[in-house]
Amino acid sequence: MSFHPHSVDKSSAPSKNWLGFTLAFLFAIGAFFSGLQVGQGAFPEAGQTANIFSIFSSKPVEAAPDNKPDLNEFWKVWDLLGEKFATGSSSAPLTDEDKVRGAIEGLVGSYGDPYTVYFPPKEASAFDENISGNFSGVGMEVGLREKLITVIAPLVGTPAEQAGILAGDVIVKINATSTENMNIDEAVSLIRGEKGTVVNLKIFREGEKDFLEIPVTRDTINIPTVKTEKVGDTFVIAIYSFNAIVEEQMQTALKEYIESKAKTLVIDLRGNPGGYLQSAVNIASYFLPAGKVVVQESFSDNEKDEVFRSRGPQLKEFTPQNLVVLVDNGSASASEILAGALQDHGVATILGTQTFGKGSVQELIKLDDNSSVKITVARWLTPNGTSISKAGLTPNIVISRTPENRMDEEDPQKDAAIDFLKGKKVVSETTEEETPAE
C-alpha cells in the first residue's frame, strides 16, 4: 500500500518515536510508504528492542505479579498440544519459536484493531521493504471497514485507477485467495508484486448485481501531489497525497491562486488517503490564525494528549462562503485532519460524501529477533473533539458522485462547489434543504 505516508511525520516531537500509519498501505509506491510517519524520531533508537521470548522464559509460572495475569493455563495448553497433537504427514512439526510467535500473534489480534499487527521476521522484512518503497504495486490505498478489505482510494494515473477500481470497492478475493478474516498487511503482501505481473481482484461494488473480476497489471507507482486549475472566478487546488513535497507544491499553488485574482477557492481532497501529519498541520496554517488547534492526539490514560496548532502565517481571511473543501469516502487520515480543522473553525464549507474515518497513530517497535509489532498508540480528534476514527467527517453539504458519473467524466461535486461559491442554491442530498451562500 501506499505505503503512503498516510500517516504522519512527527518530526516536531523527536522525543517520541512514533510511526503514524494512516491507513493500510498504498500498494506500490516507488518513493512512498503509506501511512508511515518517517523523519526525525520516526524509528526507535538503537537498542530499543524487546525479546519476544523473554515473557516465556520460565515454566511454569509460580506466582504472577499483582499486575500480571496467571499463565498457568497457557502452559497447560502448551504441554497438552505437545503431548497429544498429531502432526500431519505433509506438515513439519512446529518449533518452540513458531508456537511463541503464534501466541503473540493471537494476543495482538485479540485487541481487534486492524492497525495493531505483529510481524514475524519474514513479514517484518517485507514491511520494511514497503516503507523504503523498493517494490511495485497497483497504486491504491486500502483499509478495513466492517472487517472487509475496502479500497480507500486509487491514486490518480495508477494501474488501479486505469483498471476501473473505485473508492469503496470491497476486495473479496486476491487471485484465488479469499480475503475473509484477512488483515490489511496480508492483503498488501498479496496485491503487491513484481512490475509487469498481473493480480486478479474479485470486487464487490455497491449497486452491482454481480461480483466484478478486475485484472490489474502491477507497475512502479509515482504518486501525484498537487494540481491546479481556474474555473471562472474559482481557483481549484487538488491535493492527492500529503507526501514529503506537498508543502512546497502547495506554496506554489497558493501563489498561483493569489496571482489569478480568483474570488473563491476550492481545496479538493477527494481520493486523498493521507500522508504526513505535519504537512496537514502546516497547510491548515495558511487558512487559520496562528495558535488555533488543528488536531488533537488522544493517547492512552498514561500519556497526556498532544495538541497541534496553526503556526501561520494565515494567507488571508477565509469564510464558508469563499472556501469549499471537497471530500469523499476516499479522503482519509491527513485529509480528514485538514478538512476537520477548517470545518470546526468555520472557515470552509465541506462538500461531498462521508470521509473514510482513519484517525489513528501507530508506533512500530522492532524486536530483537528481527520481528516487529505495530501498535495503535493514539487517536485523532478534530478541534471540537470529534473522533475521526468513529465515522469520519460529515460534510456540510452532501453531494454524491456515482461510478456512472466517473465513467462519463462528470463531476457533480465540483460543479456543486463552484455553483455554491457563485451564490447559487445547492441542495444537500441528505437534508434536502437548500443551502445558499451568503
Image (cartoon, grey):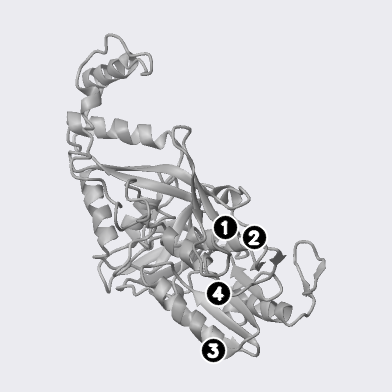
Name the amino acid, label 1: Lys
For label 3, the SS is: helix
- Describe the element under mark 1 as helix, strand or loop: loop
Image check: 339 left or right of 379? right
Percent of width and height locating residue 231: 62, 88
Mark 4 residue crowding within 10 angstroms, few (<14) / some (14–19) / many (20+) = some
Q: Which residue is mark 3?
A: 259
Marking on residue 345: 2
Image mark for residue 315: 4
Q: Is residue 427 above or below residue 355?
A: below
- The residues tagged by marks 3 and 4 sit, at their Cα atoms, a distance apart of 13 Å
| Nearest the eye: 374 or 95 | 374
Q: Quadrant of the N terminus?
A: bottom left
Q: Are marks 2 and 4 in contact (CB under 8 Å)?
A: no
**Label 1 with label 2: CB-CB less than 8 Å:** yes
Alpha-carbon neighbours of circle 1 within 10 Å: few (<14), some, or many (≥20)? some
